[in-house]
Image (cartoon, rainbow, N blue to C red):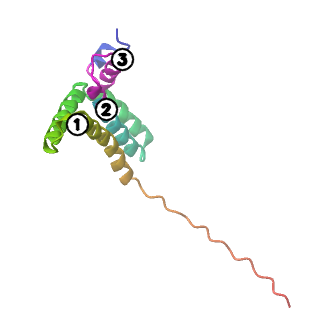
Amino acid sequence: MSPFPRFMDGSMLVGMHKALSSWQHSQWVVMSYGVLLSSVLALGKSVSRRNVLLGLGLVVALVLLIPAKSAQVLSTYTMQFAHEAGKMLDMPANQPTIYNIASITMMWLPWLISDQFEPKEEKKETKRRKKPSKKQE
């Protein structure tokens, strides 16, 4: 029995809950949910710099509207990439390691892009007034 309403069954939130609460899903799909969640949160952080409510609303909407099937598709494409990279590097036995490196890179990249577009803080220098020197006469 799911703690979520029936209309949310196809959403990323419910898919992530099912993947984490059952052993039917492999580690690879869980990593793909992490990639999607990282991308959504990084986008929400970027938008919330202008308007906090809009950023929060965007995160909630994307978590509810992105289909859970997209994590499986992302996992499949990442595994294909890891397979091709392993063949190209003549290291097919290291395919799981290449998959993990690709997934971690895809989790880190949205935050890197978000930080690049962050407005730079302007440092305000306070001007100190010079105290009048006491002249000895």
| Res 46 quadrant in image | top left
Q: Residue at x 33, y 32 (%)?
A: 34
The image position of residue 27, as x and y in percent, is 29, 26
SS assignment at label 1 = helix
Disc number for residue 21? 3
Foreground mark, 2 or 3, reads 3
Which amino acid lies under the numbered mark 3 shown in the image of this protein?
A: Ser
Q: Badge 1, how many Cα within 10 Å: few under 14, some, many 20+?
A: some
| Among numbered discs 3 and 1, the one appearing first in the sequence | 3
| Among numbered discs 2 and 1, the one appearing first in the sequence | 2
The image position of residue 4, as x and y in percent, is 36, 15
Disc number for residue 94? 1
Calculate the distance from the C-alpha at mark 2 to the C-alpha at mark 1. Answer: 34 Å
The image position of residue 85, as x and y in percent, is 17, 42
- Residue occupied by mark 2: 62
Which amino acid lies under the numbered mark 1 shown in the image of this protein?
A: Asn
Q: Above or below — where is 121 with respect to 54?
A: below
Disc number for residue 128? none
SS assignment at label 2 = helix
Q: Residue at x 23, y 36 (%)?
A: 94
